[in-house]
Image (cartoon, rainbow, N blue to C red):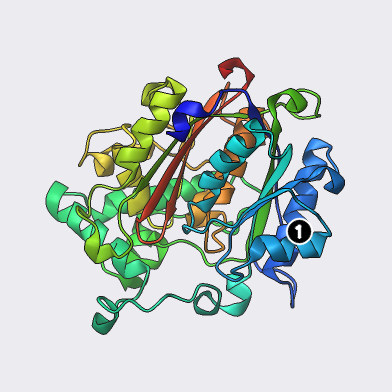
């Protein structure tokens, strides 16, 4: 298995940046946003465009995104990876870049994303493939799929809409400390419950934002990382759990592939949930952090709703979760997995200002793609973990 071959400290994340977020300038393309993120991330670590010899990218708006970006930036990479498994693609790219760097196939890799889904509409930016088994029932995807998981969790474990709302409220509290966040107003449980219903039991405040945006991270060898201007952050654990494509084929709507990817990542890192300082989860809907907290071992299965209640995952709570405000309140340009990597790196470098988690040295980053389909877990650590 690749997990057994990757050497701790052989590669590091050295630069991170967002592109413009929210509603971008007219006629901006996803590749514009990728390039913007790349240049900003290179500036973050002190490298130049001419140093880049590997490209990793995914977006729903361009099938051949690495080739388009190569052309746009005038690069001649020795390695490229266009793996597309939804919003978790970028967590997979971290492991792929780690392996390529360790094997000497490249030295400086950029992982990037761009989307203009707010500008052009979500439907245009993320067209859904026709599903012959589900489409005749006219589901409103992806909310319908996540609503099914939420409804099942409520039925099976007694989870309440109020508990789902606590996830949205916590995310908003973190977002209010993030100058880059889209949402700028406080949010209450009562407001979540009173908001427009999208797909029962999920209201509009249980669903992620629809924004434009992009960004990039830069990875290089462990040795080169020590010479650059920012503290390196190291991938130290990795796991995958791909469970299905269609929601109708999910074996258990309350158990995700994170129950497979999490243990693999922990075993590789030699850590457990109690050793993690910062938790960055893909929160496309309020049910997803509840499911992932359970499946990643932070609480028993079925206890997620009670676990997130009472401000436990909000600022000042005992477990800092989605510290940038998440896809629910910070940004969500369609494929969100890159942004939790960016936030985790900033937390481990101590750069998050008011929302900084004190003495953060380890972070778990969990990406989700499709309709709870592709689950990728990365564990990141500061220099003391290598």
Q: Is residue 128 above or below residue 375?
A: below
Image height of 192 relative to 259, above or below = below
Would residue 112 be found to the left or right of residue 60 on screen? Answer: right
- Image point (37%, 79%), residue name: 130
Query: In the image shown, does 270 or 360 lie closer to the viewer?
Result: 270
List x then y, in percent, for residue 240: 40, 42
Quadrant location of the C terminus? top right
Q: Nearer the viewer, residue 35 or 285?
A: 35
Horizontal side of residue 238 vs 37, given as left or right:
left
Question: Where 221 sits versus 332, above or below?
Answer: above
**Quadrant location of residue 104?**
top right
Q: Position of residue 33 (x, y in %)?
A: 71, 62
Q: Which residue is mark 1?
A: 35
Image coords of residue 18 (percent x, y): 69, 52
Residue 141 in view of the camera: yes
Q: Residue furthest top?
A: 384
Within the image, what quadrant is residue 140 found in?
bottom left
Q: Quadrant of residue 185?
A: bottom right
Give how far across and how far down residue 12 sits, in percent: 65, 31
| Residue at screen point 54% across, 56% down | 83
């Amino acid at each position: 298995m690749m997990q057994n071959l990757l050497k701790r400290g052989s590669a590091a994340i050295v630069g991170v940046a967002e592109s413009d977020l929210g509603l971008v300038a007219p006629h901006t393309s996803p590749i514009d946003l990728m390039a913007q993120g790349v240049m900003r991330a290179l500036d973050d670590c002190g490298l130049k465009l001419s140093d880049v010899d590997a490209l990793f990218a995914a977006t729903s708006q361009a099938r051949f995104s690495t080739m388009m970006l190569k052309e746009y930036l005038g690069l001649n990479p020795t390695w490229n990876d266009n793996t597309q498994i939804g919003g978790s693609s970028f967590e997979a790219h971290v492991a792929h870049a780690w392996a390529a760097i360790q094997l000497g196939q490249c030295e400086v890799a950029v992982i990037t994303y761009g989307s203009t889904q707010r500008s052009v509409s979500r439907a245009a930016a993320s067209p859904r493939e026709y599903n012959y088994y589900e489409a005749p029932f006219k589901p409103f995807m992806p909310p319908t799929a996540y609503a099914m998981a939420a409804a099942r969790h409520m039925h099976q474990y007694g989870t309440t809409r109020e508990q789902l709302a606590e996830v949205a409220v916590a995310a908003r509290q973190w977002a209010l400390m993030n100058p880059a966040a889209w949402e700028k107003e406080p949010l209450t449980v009562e407001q979540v419950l009173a908001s427009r219903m999208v797909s029962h039991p999920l209201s509009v405040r249980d669903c992620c934002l629809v924004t434009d945006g992009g960004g990039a991270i830069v990875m290089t060898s462990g040795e080169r990382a020590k010479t650059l201007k920012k503290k390196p952050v190291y991938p130290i654990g990795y796991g995958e759990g791909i469970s299905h494509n269609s929601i109708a084929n999910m074996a258990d709507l309350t158990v995700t592939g994170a129950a497979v990817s999490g243990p693999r990542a922990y075993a590789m890192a030699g850590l457990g949930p109690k050793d993690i300082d910062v938790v960055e989860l893909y929160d496309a809907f309020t049910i997803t952090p509840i499911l992932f907290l359970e499946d990643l071992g932070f609480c028993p299965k079925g206890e997620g709703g009670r676990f997130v209640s009472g401000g436990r995952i909000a600022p000042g709570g005992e477990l800092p979760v989605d510290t940038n405000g998440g896809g629910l309140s910070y940004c969500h340009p369609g494929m969100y997995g890159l942004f939790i990597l960016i936030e985790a790196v900033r937390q481990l470098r101590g750069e998050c200002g008011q929302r900084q988690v004190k003495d953060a040295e380890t972070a778990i980053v969990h990406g989700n793609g499709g309709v709870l389909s592709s689950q990728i877990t990365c564990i990141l650590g500061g220099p003391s973990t290598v």
